[in-house]
């Protein structure tokens, strides 16, 4: 008995030391992770609860999922919501595809070709990205007014004009993001393909583009999300309600404090989140590689 007590005390101290070390090194991360998850998930759960509340008001919501009704979702059919969904998907997908093609072509040219003005062009693109887009709003509006007098399809209240504006504003950042990724591909592969008789277009489409799929997915995703959630440019350019995007159209439901329709707004928000969620899940395996590889190579 005299030898057992010290052994037990030493074991307890050792276990206490291990628990203390575990809390200092690992354990504290679990409460922090739970807090972050709660902070991120609570607004989403609250919006979902509000979309199922038939009262259609956020002020009287005291507990989550107090009442469950799909009336707000049914009321969406009485509005132009699905028209706005179609407009948003058309603009977002067109902007994403255009951003990928234009950015890839520009990055390939800067990465593979040596021409006069190459370095100054890259510097100019970098300088243009330093200015916020809000600086160009007035210029874009006046430009589209003048352009619409000549080409109505590219004037005010045109979805094509809005897509062109999105492509122009994102070209510089997309080019720089892809430029670093293109530089990570050895040029010896291009030279070997040229020896075999391949043209520049064959090298670009058949060899380079499949190798840079991660950054293409990232650029397309960022362009789609940016166009999908944009409000200011869409509100400036699109005038008629039939051409509005989701951000502009749904804002009209809550712009007036006295007649705000928060229930239908929440229902529309839940549905509007689905395309972005599906796209993230479909491209998630490319996101990490596409964002990191281009930033550390080149």
Image (cartoon, rainbow, N blue to C red):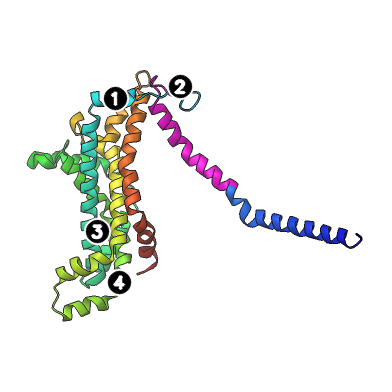
Residue 92 quadrant: top left
Residue 266 visible here:
yes
Label 3 vs label 4, nearer the camera: 4
Q: Label 4 to label 2, Cα distance in Å?
A: 56 Å
For label 4, count other residues whose C-alpha is less than 10 Å away and answer few (under 14), some (14-19) or many (20+): some
Q: Nearer the viewer, residue 92 or 28?
A: 28
Q: Residue beneath label 3, please?
A: 103
Residue 189 sits in quarter: bottom left
As drawn, the residue found furthest toward the right would be 2
Question: Tag 2 or tag 4, which sits nearer the N-term?
Answer: 2
Distance Cα–Cα, label 2 vs label 1: 22 Å
Q: Which mark is residue 74?
A: 1
Q: Is residue 58 magenta?
A: yes
Q: SS at mark 4?
A: loop
Q: Position of residue 289 (x, y in %)?
A: 37, 61
Instruction: Give the left or right position of residue 225, taking residue 41 as reference.
Output: left
- The local crowd at label 3, few if under 14, some if 14 to 19, many if 20 or more residues have their Cα within 10 Å, is many
Residue that mark 2 sits on: 59
């Amino acid at each position: 008995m005299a030898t057992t007590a010290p052994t037990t005390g030493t074991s307890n101290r050792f276990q206490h030391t291990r628990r203390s070390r575990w809390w200092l090194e690992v354990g504290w991360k679990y409460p922090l992770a739970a807090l972050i998850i709660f902070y991120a998930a609570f607004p989403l759960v609250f919006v979902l609860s509000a979309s199922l509340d038939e009262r259609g008001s956020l002020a009287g919501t005291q507990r989550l999922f107090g009442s469950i009704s799909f009336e707000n979702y049914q009321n969406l059919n009485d509005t132009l919501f699905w028209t706005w969904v179609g407009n948003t998907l058309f603009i977002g997908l067109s902007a994403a595809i255009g951003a990928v093609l234009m950015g890839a072509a520009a990055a390939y040219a800067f990465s593979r070709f040596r021409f006069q003005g190459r370095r100054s062009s890259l510097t100019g693109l970098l300088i243009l990205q330093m200015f916020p887009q809000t600086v160009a709003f007035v210029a874009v509006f006046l430009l589209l007014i003048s352009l619409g007098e000549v080409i109505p399809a590219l004037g005010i209240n045109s979805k094509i004009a809005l897509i062109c504006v999105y492509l122009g504003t994102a070209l510089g950042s997309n080019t720089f993001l892809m430029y670093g990724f293109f530089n990570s591909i050895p040029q010896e592969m291009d030279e070997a393909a040229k020896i075999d008789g391949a043209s520049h277009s064959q090298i670009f489409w058949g060899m380079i583009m499949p190798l840079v799929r991660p950054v293409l997915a990232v650029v397309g995703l960022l362009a789609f999300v940016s166009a999908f959630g944009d409000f200011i440019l869409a509100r400036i350019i699109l005038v008629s309600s039939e051409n509005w995007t989701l951000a502009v159209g749904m804002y009209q439901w809550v712009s007036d404090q006295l007649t705000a329709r928060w229930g239908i707004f929440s229902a529309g928000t839940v549905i509007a989140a689905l395309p972005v969620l599906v796209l993230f899940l479909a491209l998630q395996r490319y996101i990490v590689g596409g964002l990191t590889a281009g930033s550390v190579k080149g």
